[in-house]
Image (tube, helix red, strand yellow):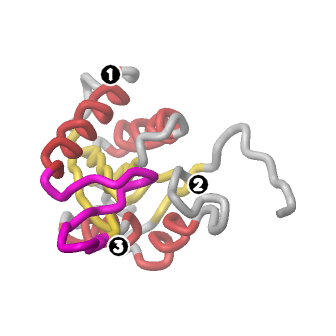
């Protein structure tokens, strides 16, 4: 049987993340594995009139607020964790900046992750144009198996 000792739960901190966390924690308990929680702040660098800015989600922020974004992400991750009983699990939180698909697969490679548990859809700037793009990117590039969880209320609708 395959040894699963490190499980990655990449999250966009959306309301659906709580549902996916149930699966990630169940798998961590089943395999007595550590749970790695990763939030990637989506950043597209821009240079406007000599001022460096970054586009983050639907907001424009200066690069100087990177520490504030990281702190806010850790607070939101902890809030998500506090909603579930994690007392019996080893949980590690990480924040990265960049393109979520790329950063997640690189993190999985560098940390030697054994399994990724993630949502099929999340909140991104392009969510209406390319639903599930980040998940698809991770499934194809991940160095380990990926368990993708769909939203329990997900309905298929033709575009």
**Image quarter of residue 32:** top left
**Sequence order check: which comes first, mark 2 or mark 3?**
3
Question: Crowdedness of circle 3 by 10 Å Cα count: few (<14), some, many (20+)?
Answer: some
Q: Position of residue 61 (x, y in %)?
A: 28, 53
Cβ–Cβ under 8 Å for marks 1 and 2: no
Q: Which residues are magenta?
A: 45-64
**Image quarter of residue 143:** bottom left
Magenta-drawn stretch contains 49: yes
Query: Residue at the location (29% across, 46% down)?
Result: 37
In the rendered structure, find residue 102 and report the number of the disc placed on it: 3
Element under disc 3 = helix
In the rendered structure, find residue 82 and report the number of the disc placed on it: 1
Q: Position of residue 110 (x, y in %)?
A: 19, 70
Q: Nearer the viewer, mark 1 or mark 2?
A: 2
Element under disc 2 = loop
Q: Position of residue 34 (x, y in %)?
A: 24, 45
Query: Residue at the location (28% across, 72% down)?
Result: 48
In the rendered structure, find residue 31 and report the number of the disc placed on it: none
Instruction: Give the Cα separation between the discs numbered 1 and 2.
Output: 23 Å
**Sequence order check: which comes first, mark 3 or mark 1?**
1
Instruction: Give the Cα separation between the discs numbered 3 and 1.
Output: 28 Å
Magenta-drawn stretch contains 121: no
In the rendered structure, find residue 121 and report the number of the disc placed on it: 2
Q: Nearer the viewer, residue 31 or 155?
A: 155
Q: Main secondary structure of the magenta part?
A: strand
Q: Nearer the viewer, residue 69 or 51?
A: 51
Farthest-out residue, front: 49
**Sequence order check: which comes first, mark 1 or mark 2?**
1
Question: Crowdedness of circle 2 by 10 Å Cα count: few (<14), some, many (20+)?
Answer: many
């Amino acid at each position: 049987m395959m040894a699963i000792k490190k499980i990655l739960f990449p999250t966009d901190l959306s309301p659906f993340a709580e549902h996916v966390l149930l699966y990630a924690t169940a798998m961590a308990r089943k395999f007595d594995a550590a749970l790695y929680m990763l939030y990637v702040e989506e950043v597209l660098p821009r240079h406007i009139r000599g001022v460096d800015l970054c586009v983050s989600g639907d907001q424009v922020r200066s690069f100087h607020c990177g520490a504030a974004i990281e702190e806010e992400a850790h607070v939101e991750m902890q809030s998500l964790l506090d909603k579930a009983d994690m007392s019996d699990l080893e949980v590690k939180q990480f924040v990265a900046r960049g393109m979520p698909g790329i950063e997640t697969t690189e993190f999985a490679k560098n940390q030697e992750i054994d399994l990724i548990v993630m949502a099929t859809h999340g909140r991104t700037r392009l969510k209406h144009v390319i639903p599930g793009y980040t998940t698809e990117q991770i499934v194809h590039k991940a160095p380990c198996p990926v368990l993708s969880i769909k939203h329990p209320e997900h309905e298929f609708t033709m575009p």
